[in-house]
Image: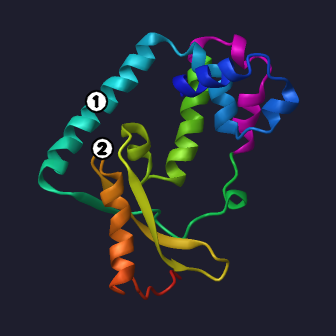
């Protein structure tokens, strides 16, 4: 969030309301709050990420890939799970950039919680930077997919991409899944 906020500010330090309104709420939050996150919070977050990466190294020393669901159910369209209005209002509050850091952090935590519960199986890889690939296995009547996620160690991107190609080539990717009721 800090890096995104700094990059956005560097790219467009004087963004106007109309331009900011085009951004996803989480991205707007990064723009407003990211550069203001105190070094202690930033350090705490990176300390946790370092712990996760260390634990994952233990796993990747024994296994080449990790296989997880992509989501707990069929993928959701953006319209089906909008950012709650109270979070959007808090993000778009004109006072937010001037609020206390603890108030800003409350908005950050509420926003992150919203996004985390939508993507519980992918968030860890977003934090640690491990390459991951989603392999769609089935689609519902609306074309939304249910799939698996394959995660590799750092710099295993090309190996990771080869897996679904190999499965497809050997016809082992044809999976018949009954829709969830």
Q: Which residue is mark 1?
A: 50
Please rate how many residues cluster around mark 1, counting C-alpha atoms within 10 Å: few if below 14, some from 14 to 19, many from 20. some
State the mark number for residue 3.
none
CB within 8 Å, label 1 to label 2? no
Please rate how many residues cluster around mark 2, counting C-alpha atoms within 10 Å: few if below 14, some from 14 to 19, many from 20. few
Q: Which residue is mark 2?
A: 154
Q: Secondary structure at mark 2?
A: loop
Depth check, mark 1 against mark 2: the one in front is 2
Instruction: Examine the rendered structure and indicate whether residue 81 appears above or below residue 144.
Output: above
Task: Indicate left or right for 112 with 149 as reference.
Answer: right
Task: Indicate left or right for 86 with 180 as reference.
Answer: right
The percent coordinates of residue 75 (x first, y second) are 56, 66
Residue drawn 21% across the image and 36% down it: 54
Nearest the viewer among 29 and 96 is: 29
Instruction: Examine the rendered structure and indicate whether residue 103 appears above or below residue 170.
Output: above
Q: Secondary structure at mark 1?
A: helix
The percent coordinates of residue 44 (x first, y second) are 37, 20
Residue drawn 31% across the image and 24% down it: 47
Residue drawn 61% across the image and 18% down it: 103
The percent coordinates of residue 45 (x first, y second) are 39, 25
Which quarter of the picture shows residue 97? Answer: top right
| Residues shaded magenta | 84-102
Task: Indicate left or right for 113 with 79 as reference.
Answer: left
């Amino acid at each position: 969030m800090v890096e995104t906020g700094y990059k956005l500010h560097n790219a467009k330090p004087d963004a106007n309301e109309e331009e900011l309104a085009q951004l996803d709420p989480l991205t707007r939050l990064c723009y407003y709050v990211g550069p203001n996150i105190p070094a202690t919070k930033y350090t705490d977050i990176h300390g946790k990420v370092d712990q996760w990466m260390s634990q994952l190294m233990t796993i990747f020393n024994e296994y080449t890939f990790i296989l997880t669901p992509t989501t707990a159910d069929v993928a959701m369209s953006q319209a089906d799970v909008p950012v709650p209005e109270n979070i959007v209002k808090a993000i778009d509050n004109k006072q937010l950039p001037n609020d206390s850091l603890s108030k800003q952090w409350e908005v950050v935590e509420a926003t992150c919680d919203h996004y985390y519960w939508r993507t519980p199986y992918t968030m860890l890889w977003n934090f640690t930077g491990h390459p991951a690939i989603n392999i769609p296995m089935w689609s519902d009547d609306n074309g939304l997919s249910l799939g698996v996620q394959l995660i590799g160690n750092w710099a295993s991107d090309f190996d990771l991409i080869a897996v679904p190609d190999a499965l497809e080539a050997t016809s082992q990717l044809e999976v018949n899944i009954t829709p969830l009721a």
